[in-house]
DNA sequence: AAGCTAAAGCAAACTCTTAGCTTTTACCTG
DNA sequence: CAGGTAAAAGCTAAGAGTTTGCTTTAGCTT
C-alpha cells in the first residue's frame, strides 16, 4: 500500500543497509535481528513481521548483492567474452563472501524466488554476450546451453567442492562449448 | 574417546533418530533443539555442545539420508545405465523433501565437508557405472565429465530453478555426452 | 481535511541458547 | 579387576532472541 518513497520502502532500505553495515563490522555470523533492528532504527518485531526470520532477511540482502552491476565486457569474440565472463564469475562467486551470499540466497523461502533471481542474473549476462555475438554474425549456442555447460558446473563446484577451483577450470568449460571433439563416450 | 558402542555413539544415534522421527511427525520447520533433545532422552546442552546449533545437526542428518542405499542398476549399456541413474537422481532430489535435504546439507559448516560428501556420493555412483561399462569394453568418459555435464546441471536446476524439471531434461543431458554434434557455437 | 487501512511501535510472555559447575561413563593403568 | 582419569553428559540459572496482542502512526483516498 505504501509504494514509492513511503514508510515501508524506507524501513526496508534502512534494514537492508543495516545488514550490510553490520555484516561488514561484526561479521555475518554475528548478526542478530535485534542488532539489525537497532541500527536501522526500528523495532525487532517489525523485522520479524516483514521477513519472518533472520534467514529470509539475509537471503533478500544476498540476492541484492549478487545482482551484477556491470555489463559483460566486449572482447571482440564470443569465445573471449564468455571466457572473461566465466573467469570473473568464478572469481567473485568462489570467494568466501561470494559463497556466503549464494548460500544465504539459497536459504530463503524456496518459493520466494530468491534463488531463481540469482539464476536469472547469470542468464541475463549470458544473453547480452550471446546477442552481441549474434550481431557480429557469429554462430551462437542457446542461453540454456551455456547455463548447463558453464554456469551450472561452476556453481556446482563452488557449492559442493570449494577446493581446487581455478580460472583454468572456467576456461576449459568455455572451451567445451566450442570443442566438438567428444567426451570419450562411444555412441 | 568413546568409539564403538560407547555412550557418545548411543547419544549420536539417538539424536539422529529423534530428528528423523520428529521431522516426519511435526515437519522439518517445526524442529527445535529442546524438542529433539527430549525425544532423544538427552539434555539440550548436550546437543548444543556436540553440534553447535540446529543447522549443523540437520546438516548431518541430511547427508546421512542423501547417501545412496543401492548400487546403480545394470541395464546393459553405459548410456542406459547413465540415463536410468540420472532419472532416478533427479526424481529423488527434486522432490520437496529431497531439496530440503540438499539445502540442509549445504547449510552446515562449509568446512565441515557435508556438502563435499554429497558430491562424493554421486561421484561414487557414477564411478560404478563407468567401471562396469569399461569392463564391457565400452569407451567411457571421465567421472569429471559426467559430473560436469549431468550432475551439475541437474543440481543447478534443482537448487536454482525448481520449476520445469522433468525426466526428459535428464535424458537430454546424458545424450549430450554421447552426441558430438555441437552446441551451435562456431570455433 | 477526515477517514481508513496497512504497517510500525510497544511491552510482556515465552522459548531457545549459553555457560559454569557437578556427575557419570568408559577406557586404561597397576 | 579395582582405582584413576579424562571426555562427555546432566543440571541449572542467567541471558538473549522470538512471538504476540494491542496501540499508535503514516500515508493514501475521497
Image (cartoon, coloured by chain):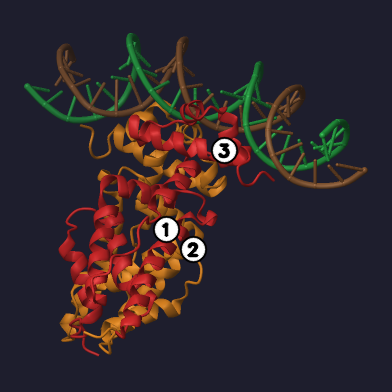
Chain colours: A orange, B red, C brown, D green
Q: Is residue A47 left or right of residue A138?
A: right
Which chain does the numbered disc 2 sit on?
A: A
Quarter occupied by residue C25: top right
Which x, y percent locates residue D3?
88, 32
Residue under numbered circle 3: B10
Q: Nearer the viewer, mark 2 or mark 3?
A: 3
Q: Is residue A148 left or right of residue B53?
A: left
- Other residues around mark 2 within 10 Å, as few (<14) / some (14–19) / many (≥20): few
Residue under numbered circle 1: B118
Q: Is residue A86 left or right of residue A25?
A: left
Residue at the image position 30 percent from the left and 73 percent from the top? B149
Rendered position, A167 above or below A159 = below
Disc 3/disc 1 C-alpha distance (Å): 24 Å
Rendered position, B128 above or below A182 = above
- Other residues around mark 1 within 10 Å, as few (<14) / some (14–19) / many (≥20): many
Disc 2/disc 3 C-alpha distance (Å): 38 Å
Amino acid at each position: 500500500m505504501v509504494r514509492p518513497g513511503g514508510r515501508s520502502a524506507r524501513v526496508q532500505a534502512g534494514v537492508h543497509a543495516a545488514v550490510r553495515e553490520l555484516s561488514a563490522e561484526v561479521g555475518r555470523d554475528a548478526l542478530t535481528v535485534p542488532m539489525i533492528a537497532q541500527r536501522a532504527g526500528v523495532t525487532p518485531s517489525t523485522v520479524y513481521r516483514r521477513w519472518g526470520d533472520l534467514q529470509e532477511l539475509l537471503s533478500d540482502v544476498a540476492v541484492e548483492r549478487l545482482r551484477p552491476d556491470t555489463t559483460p565486457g566486449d572482447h571482440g569474440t564470443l569465445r573471449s567474452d564468455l571466457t572473461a565472463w566465466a573467469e570473473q564469475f568464478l572469481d567473485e562467486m568462489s570467494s568466501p563472501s561470494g559463497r556466503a551470499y549464494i548460500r544465504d540466497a539459497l536459504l530463503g523461502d524456496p518459493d520466494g524466488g530468491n534463488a531463481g533471481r540469482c539464476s536469472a542474473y547469470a542468464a541475463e549476462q549470458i544473453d547480452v554476450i550471446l546477442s552481441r555475438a549474434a550481431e557480429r554474425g557469429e554462430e551462437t549456442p542457446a542461453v540454456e546451453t551455456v547455463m548447463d555447460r558453464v554456469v551450472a558446473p561452476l556453481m556446482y563446484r563452488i557449492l559442493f567442492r570449494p577446493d581446487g577451483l581455478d580460472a583454468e577450470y572456467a576456461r576449459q568449460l568455455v572451451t567445451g562449448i566450442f570443442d566438438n571433439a567428444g567426451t570419450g563416450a562411444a555412441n
